[in-house]
Amino acid sequence: MVKDRYVYPAIFTVEPEGISVEFPDLQGCFTCGDTEEEALQMAKDALELHLYGFEEEGRQIPNPSKFVSLKIDKNQFVSLIEVWMPPIRDEMVLKTVKKTLTIPKWLNDLGEQNKVNFSHVLQDALKQYLGVENYKQLISKKNISKKNKV
């Protein structure tokens, strides 16, 4: 089940080269940092992206282990990492994607002479063509469409 807030235990391993971080409940979710502060921030980032990937792929998100059930070594400590997903989802949807397109040379030359921002023009044209102004409007349209199908 997709939720907005997740809290997972992370195991921090302190070594001379830095601090590595693993999430025992999330296979493949690892990160590291040079300091405790950096390792904590990197752990939060790693957890956000890992859980976002699960959501996008429609994979079941495992339940977190109980804090006290984790076995650790002397050079390790456990910290709970909390993430709030709505801004992460928004950020991922709004990130830019590079597209390659083909237009006639004469049109490219004319656009460059007139200092046209090709990305901006393409975005405006796509929004007009698709009948949306922003992604929140698109989400709203999708939700209305789902309700009408029920």
Image: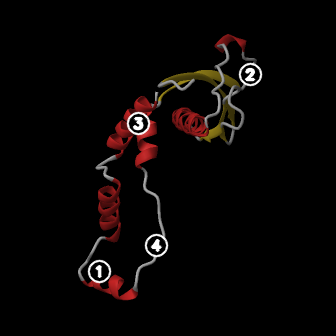
Could you classify mark 4 by the number of other residues whose Cα lies within 10 Å: few (under 14), some (14-19), or many (20 or more)? few
**Which comes sooner in the sequence, label 1 or label 3?**
1
Q: Quadrant of residue 143?
A: top left
- Going by the numbered disc 1, the residue's amino acid type is Gly
**Which comes sooner in the sequence, label 1 or label 2?**
2
Q: Secondary structure at mark 2?
A: loop
Q: Which mark is residue 101?
A: 4
Q: Which mark is residue 90?
A: none
Q: Please tell me which residue is depicted at 46% across the width and 73% down the height of the picture.
A: 101
Q: Which residue is mark 3?
A: 145
Alpha carbon distance from label 2 to label 3:
55 Å
Alpha carbon distance from label 4 to label 2:
56 Å
Q: Nearer the viewer, mark 3 or mark 4?
A: 3
Alpha carbon distance from label 3 to label 4:
31 Å
Q: Which mark is residue 74?
A: 2
- Going by the numbered disc 4, the residue's amino acid type is Leu
Contact (Cβ within 8 Å) of mark 1 with mark 2: no
**Which comes sooner in the sequence, label 4 or label 2?**
2
Image-based side of 22 in relation to 87, left or right: right
